[in-house]
Image (cartoon, grey):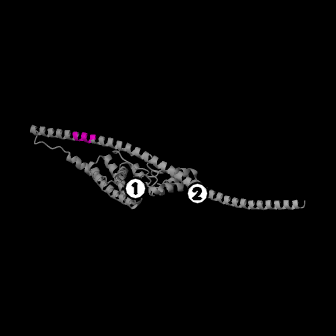
Amino acid sequence: MTPMPIDALTTEADELYGLVPEEFTSARNARAKAVRADDRELAQRIGELRKPSPAAWIVNRLVREQPDGIDELLDLGQDLREAQSAGDGRALTGIGSERRKLVSGLLHEATRIADDAGRPPSRAVLDEVEQSLIAATVDERAGEALATGRLVRGIQAVGFEDVDLDGAVAGEASARRPPKRRTTRSGGEVTAERSGATASKRTSKQGAGDSDAAAEREAEAERRRVDAARAAERERAEADVQEARDRAEQAQRELDEAQDLLHAAEWHADELRDERHDLETRLKELRSEIADAERGEREAERARAKAATAADRARDDVEAAETALDALG
């Protein structure tokens, strides 16, 4: 399949979202200014790119500096979704354990990246990085978005629902080739073997004999107790899941509000910096104009003094001429 062409905005964003946040705004504005003469629409779109959050910046750097780890994470995500679809609890447990180890390693690298850049991450930032990595394994589209290396904000998964990607990526959300697909960790036929083994374990036990009614009743009672215990356990688990979802939704709302405040503050700060730049430019122009005016003032003063001297001399000449005229009677 021929890859889709990457648009100009995505190309610009690839470079910008690899920078540290402190460099982002000035670099973005410089790029917008540089392309304005040739493409005003592209310049406007570049100027609208938002600075990445601290967590998004760290994830973007991970994508660039730890591509093998990110590819492995996305492969795990594919296996996880397949196991979830098949209802393979044993595979889910194994993949979950492997994912925890891989995410832990990536978080260690994330801390190193931030420390090396002189931006030690807070616990909240690392939590957001972790949530983004996990979300990439839950939702294939979220994995593609993370793999672009152009996240604007962190992403979060709630259960196995689709991850909200609105405004999460600068440029095309899947402009780069998604990670190569692999065969399942169980190899397909192995899964069938697991299913067969599980089914064999469910074979009910034979009673001591058709005549042993008491043993049969005891076995039936045991099955009912097991079923009741499983039902109660499932009910508790469902309640726990719902409670966790409620907490996650509340946390997401609070995060969205905080991000909105952050983006508003960043926008306002950018506007003030732009205004300061304009004022500094105008101040420089005014200083030049004042210097020119002062030079003109000095030249005018010299001209006035010269004219005053000439006027004094002319008055002296008038007085001398009048005296001479009076002498002639």
Question: Between 320 and 206, which is closer to the camera in this rendering?
Answer: 320
Q: Secondary structure at mark 1?
A: helix
Q: Is residue 186 left or right of residue 149?
A: left
Q: Is residue 179 visible?
A: no
Callout count: 2
In front of the other: label 1 or label 2? 2
Residue at horizontal 74 percent and vertical 59 percent from the top: 308
Q: Is residue 240 left or right of residue 56?
A: left
Q: Amino acid at mark 2?
A: Lys
Crowd rating for badge 1 (residues with CA inside 10 Å; few <14, some 14–19, many 20+): many
The spot of residue 117 in percent (x, y) is 41, 60
Q: Is residue 234 magenta?
A: yes
The spot of residue 119 in percent (x, y) is 39, 58
Residue at horizontal 34 percent and vertical 56 percent from the top: 107
Residue annotated with mark 1? 58
Residue annotated with mark 2? 284
Magenta-colored span = 232-239
Question: Between 321 and 7, which is closer to the camera in this rendering?
Answer: 321
